[in-house]
Image: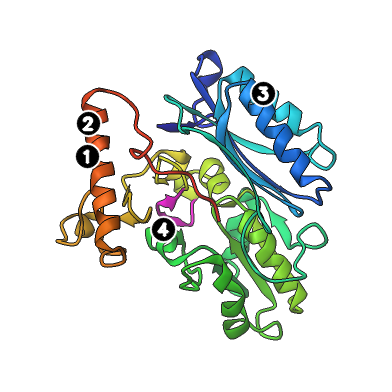
Amino acid sequence: MLRAMDSHPDSHTESPEVAVAAFYRFVALDDVAGLREGLRDTCAAHGVKGSVLLADEGINGTLAGPPSGMAAVLGWLRGIAGLEALHHKASFADVMPFHRLKVEIKPEIVTFRQPGIDPTVRVGTYIKPADWNALIDDPAVTVVDTRNDFEVELGSFVGAHNPHTTSFTEFAAWVDQHLDPARDRKVAMFCTGGIRCEKATAYLLNKGFEGVFHLDGGILQYLEDVPATDSRWQGECFVFDQRVSVGHGLVPGRTLVCHACYKPVDEAALSSSQYELGVSCPRCFGSADEAKLASRRERQRQVVLAERRRQPHIGGSMPPKRG
């Protein structure tokens, strides 16, 4: 299980087995291929595993390893031109959450598919969690959740608009259809960790919106910083790691995930005839052929056998995803 470092005041006195760092930065990178090879070698030398996306526009990833190894890798990254100010979100894990290292080169570090949108040039105004309540309490502010529909179902800020998207690539079309720069003079947006809002706010500014704001550090920073008694957040926040969801103080939530489609499942889904552990849930039922279903059932069988032997299995936990 992952646990936020800052949510455990005494964690500095412990010796955690695995340190986890989640990070992103929009910056023009000159030699992406060279960075990939250097990062692979550095991680391998320090026992660090995880998943990193690289693009000409920046870096986005989550890595885990021994605390000393993570410090070495982060130090190496901050030695790259443009990444000197790379910020990471630190947490600890009881066991290694990754089975391998994957460093990929992609067209974008978060897929939006809107040419000309460059967060390194212009983005909305960052609002600290401590100031967020005052902003969204203003009736003149249009509050928009930039996340996908299944994430919004678990929780959101009171009064926020849900675009009902299935992927972030649909968000621009929703903006074009539902927001108007002449009417929506102030727009406040938020997402899980902040990365999607970088492109979302850049898109609105490019469309002529003037008062564009986004939650600095995303929902996760808000849940960590703002006491539950003062919070405007309702429900849980879906996260792209083995915790599945978190609440205030980044305490792991009660949400489970379907290991076939990696979407959250509630109690109703668990009791559905369309739910089969490791194979399907009501969201993805009927989307796979018999060969795929047989493969999932065999994977689940291997997971159960590994658990009985008290051994880890690559299919037994949800792979981290970002977007």
Q: Earlier in the sequence, mark 4 or mark 2?
A: 4
Q: Residue at 44% of width from left, 51% of height from top?
A: 237
Q: CA distance from mark 4 to mark 2?
A: 35 Å
In the rendered view, tell whether residue 209 sits above or below residue 256: below
Q: CA distance from mark 2 to mark 1?
A: 6 Å
As for residue 209 lying within the magenta part, the answer is no
Q: CA distance from mark 4 to mark 3?
A: 34 Å
Residue 302 vs residue 277, the one in the foreground: 302
Of labels 1 and 4, the one closer to you: 1
Element at badge 1? helix
Residue kind at label 3, given as amino acid type: Ala
Quadrant of the image containing the N terminus? top left
Quadrant of the image containing the C terminus? bottom right
* Quarter assignment of residue 88: top right
Q: Is the C-beta separation of discs 3 and 2 under 8 Å? A: no
Q: Which residues are magenta?
A: 231-239
Kindly identify which residue carries mark 3.
Answer: 71
Residue 155: assigned label: 4
Kindly identify which residue carries mark 1.
Answer: 301
Residue 219 vs residue 285, the one in the foreground: 285
Q: CA distance from mark 3 to mark 1?
A: 37 Å
Spot occupied by residue 33 in the image (x, y as percentages of width and height): 75, 44
Q: Residue at 51% of width from left, 62% of height from top?
A: 147
Kindly identify which residue carries mark 2.
Answer: 305
Q: Which residue is outermost to the front?
A: 291
Spot occupied by residue 245 in the image (x, y as percentages of width and height): 40, 47
Of labels 3 and 2, the one closer to you: 2
Element at badge 4? strand
Q: Earlier in the sequence, mark 4 or mark 3?
A: 3
Q: Residue at 47% of width from left, 47% of height from top?
A: 240
